[in-house]
Amino acid sequence: MSAPESFTGERFLPGVVGEIAYEHCHRYAFARRFVAGRRVLDAACGEGYGAALLASVAQTTVGIDIDASVVAEARVRYRAHGNLLFGAASVTRLPLPDASVDAVVSFETIEHLPSVEQPQMLAEFARVLAPGGILILSSPNRPEYSDARHYANPFHLAELDRDELTQRLMPRFAASAWFAQRRYLGSAIWSEAPGERFEALSGSVTEIRVAQRPPALYFIVIAAGEADALPPQVPALSLYADGDDAEWTRIDHEAREVLRLDGLLRTRDAELREQVRYTDELKAMIAARDGAIAERVRAEAALRMDFDAALGNERAAHAAECQRLMRAIDAQERIVAYRESVRWWFVLPLLRARRLWNRIRPV
């Protein structure tokens, strides 16, 4: 079963990187010191990687999960661990005898049960724990995990805040030691001398102050029926990082991707600016062309008006000339008609005699 094919974002699988890997792996790494040499139950063990980590230091480890197919795969995957067994069952009905284990580990389980079943699960844990046994349990802190982030995990049926988790534990586990878990990326400095003391600082280049403990995204509780059963010493601070620095690699990759996308964005912006400039040039050319066309249209219109005026004058002159010629023709026609008449032939000899007299008479 490969992580990319089966990972839902809720149940952690080896091979998945990111925040979920830090959270889940750190819990099991943290629990190892408290279960060393003990008989351990990993309730809701999932894929089984956590039970295998506990088995590396425990006397014996039993992993229980309600998903039979996951349990079957875990048996095959971790068969080399001789002190590790897996079984399919509900955490509200554990298939173990009373007082058969010294430690119960149950990480991110209680919120997956309805409210009415959560006390049943804790009662089963108390039943299978031997006197002096401890419960190591984690639970998302609802005000931070869901409310502050406006987030609703579809796999969670009943998340709890600190007071509600305390009320769930008190009837069976009166003694408890609380821890807050939240992913924290910063700088860590370790002393080579052994010890549990630590220093936490925050601030800037202008002010350094003692770091405030961040609000818990998850609570981790070591609980027991009696205070004497709790471990006498617990770490004030536990740090965890994956050996391959996969999270930093992911962050670096994302940073490089942001830079690459930023470069692409700048290139696109430059191209857009060039396109805007080119568009403005085209608009200017179109405006100039439109102005030239409008000027040409105006010139053609004026030329057409002048031509029409000249043509009108020419037509008027032609019409006047036609009228004059028509009048001349009419006059000639009247003269011809007169000369063709009888009166003309009587008058013609007289006209000829007058012309002759005018030429021969003395001046």
Image (cartoon, rainbow, N blue to C red):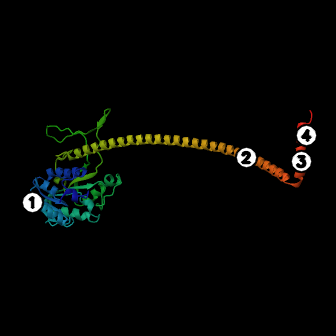
User: Tag 4 or tag 3, which sits nearer the N-term?
Assistant: 3
User: Tag 3 or tag 1, which sits nearer the N-term?
Assistant: 1
Residue 133: percent from the left, percent from the top? 15, 57
Q: CA separation, marks 1 and 2?
A: 121 Å
Amino acid of disc 1? Arg
Residue 322: percent from the left, percent from the top? 74, 48
What residue appears at the point 17 percent right and 42 percent down from the top-left corner?
Answer: 196
Q: Which residue is mark 3?
A: 349
Residue 48 falls left or right of residue 330: left
| Number of the label disc, if any, that sits on residue 315 | none
Q: Is residue 96 above or below residue 108?
A: below
Residue 319 falls left or right of residue 88: right
Q: Which mark is nearer the camera, 1 or 3?
A: 3
Q: CA separation, marks 2 and 3?
A: 45 Å
Q: Residues within 10 Å of mark 3 (few under 14, many from 20)?
A: few
User: Tag 3 or tag 2, which sits nearer the N-term?
Assistant: 2
Amino acid of disc 4? Trp
Q: Which residue is mark 4?
A: 357
Quarter of the rendering occupied by the C terminus: top right
